Image: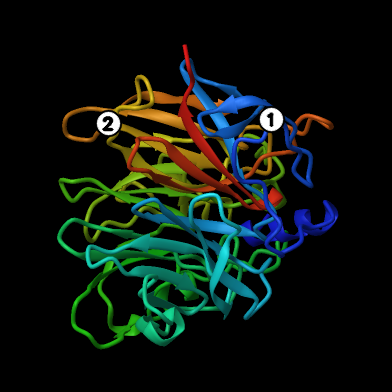
């Protein structure tokens, strides 16, 4: 299943209005259009009934935001990109300020996905085919838009860039694969010796690096390839030491190629600590250097291995290193949103890191219990995360058009 096939779920669920109707504030009870029932409060927001780690609760900040993907903050202002439900030129940049209805700063964007704040207080927005920069505090934000990266691929299953910004100003950009596993027709494998899309410029299934600050748009065709063999690195983070970390959405329907392999159990999504110049194996290898069924004789021994195997089909779409103190036991943890479309997804997990930011142990659930419960809450689909000044976490949830807040609960 392609990650953008989640739009099919949206239509099956009836979709959400992309109007500015929303729930924001400490009302005693509220119910989102897709079924969030709230009881009591989580900080200043209505509390939703999800399972959480001790000392943590989840509040409903906003709803009916369309198809929200990326989220960023500037001071107390919250910026969300509405993807437009995968329809070209229907996306928007929204600003949520205080308890006011969301303000549309930009519209007619082409499938916006990622958003982040730069040190000069501009927003980078990843669109299909390019990355733009905007001054959100300008009198006319639309007039401040400029191209930062152009000529990113827009074909195939994964046309949306993800991004992470390093302390030294390097921007890391995901270029997702065009196919599931170098084959557009599942069950009818073509087996070229070298997967053609890995030879494109830029190669598909790779992470690029870009040095910002030139003032001129950067051409993706000329950007250095930082790492490759990564099917779709939709979750990216960079540590204060410059370490680039990604979580990869692995292939689907592996059993269509080899019925002896379980599509429910294989392959695992992966957490990778990227090394410059390394190749992580896609489409030839999966998991810990296992040959893909299309390339059964391939020698995977020289491919880089993941730092952790994540649950199969968890679909990690957002990730950050938590630096705050508000959430008990979470400081210096890697927080990952499993978007999911199988049972092991639909949750936010936490992975402890050591002093060198290497993982310790295995991911533990931070927010879960997100399976559909009519009259209480819908099936959850967390996407992006951002840490607020007070140490709480904001989470977009695209399938139900909501913005949620993970915060400390009162004793």
Q: Nearer the viewer, residue 324 or 128?
A: 324
- On residue 269, the disc is none
Disc 1, SS: loop
> What residue is disc 1 on?
28
Q: CA distance from mark 2 to mark 1?
A: 34 Å
Q: Nearer the viewer, residue 338 or 184?
A: 338
> Which residue is drawn at the image coordinates 40% and 42% (left, top)?
271
> Which residue is drawn at the image coordinates 22% and 63% (left, top)?
119
> What residue is disc 2 on?
332
> Which residue is drawn at the image coordinates 50% and 41% (left, top)?
337
Disc 2, SS: loop
> How many residues crowd mark 2 within 10 Å: few (<14), some (14–19), many (20+)?
some
Image quadrant where residue 212 sits: bottom left
x and y, in percent, of residue 84 in the image: 65, 69
> Which residue is drawn at the image coordinates 34% and 37% (left, top)?
307
Q: In front of the other: label 2 or label 1?
A: 1
Q: Nearer the viewer, residue 289 or 5?
A: 5
């Amino acid at each position: 299943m392609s990650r953008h096939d989640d739009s099919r779920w949206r239509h099956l669920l009836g979709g959400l209005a992309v109007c500015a109707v929303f729930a924001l504030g400490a009302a005693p009870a509220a119910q989102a259009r897709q079924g969030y029932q709230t009881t009591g409060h989580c900080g200043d927001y209505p509390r939703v009934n999800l399972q959480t780690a001790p000392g943590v609760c989840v509040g409903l900040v906003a709803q009916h935001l369309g198809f929200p993907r990326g989220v960023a903050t500037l001071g107390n202002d919250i910026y969300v990109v509405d993807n437009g439900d995968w329809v070209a030129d229907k996306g928007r940049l929204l600003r949520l300020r205080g308890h006011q209805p969301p303000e549309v700063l930009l519209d007619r964007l082409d499938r916006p996905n990622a958003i982040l704040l730069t040190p000069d207080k501009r927003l980078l927005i990843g669109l299909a085919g390019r990355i733009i920069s905007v001054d959100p505090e300008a009198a006319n934000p639309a007039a401040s838009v400029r191209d930062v990266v152009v000529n990113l691929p827009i074909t195939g299953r994964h046309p949306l860039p993800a991004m992470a910004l390093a302390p030294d100003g390097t921007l890391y950009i995901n270029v997702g694969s065009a196919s599931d596993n170098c084959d557009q027709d599942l069950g009818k494998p073509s087996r070229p010796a070298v997967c053609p899309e890995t030879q494109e410029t830029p190669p598909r299934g790779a992470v690029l690096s870009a040095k910002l600050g030139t003032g001129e748009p950067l051409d993706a065709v000329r950007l250095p390839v930082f790492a490759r063999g990564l099917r779709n690195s939709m979750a990216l983070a960079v540590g204060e030491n410059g370490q680039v970390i990604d979580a990869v959405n692995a292939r689907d329907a592996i059993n269509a190629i080899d019925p002896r392999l379980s599509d429910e159990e294989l392959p695992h999504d992966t957490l990778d600590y990227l090394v410059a110049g390394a190749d992580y194996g896609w489409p030839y290898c999966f998991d810990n250097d296992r040959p893909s069924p299309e390339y059964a004789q391939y020698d995977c021994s020289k491919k880089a291995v993941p730092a952790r195997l994540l649950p199969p089909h968890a679909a990690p779409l957002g990730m950050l290193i938590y630096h705050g103190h508000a959430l008990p036991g979470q400081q210096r943890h890697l927080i990952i949103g499993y978007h999911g479309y199988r049972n092991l997804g639909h949750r936010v997990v936490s992975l402890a890191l050591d002093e060198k930011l290497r993982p310790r142990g295995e991911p533990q659930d931070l927010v879960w219990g997100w399976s559909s419960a009519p009259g209480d809450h819908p099936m959850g689909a967390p996407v992006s995360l951002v840490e607020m000044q007070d140490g709480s976490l904001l989470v977009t949830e695209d399938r139900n058009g909501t913005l949620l807040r993970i915060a400390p609960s009162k004793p």
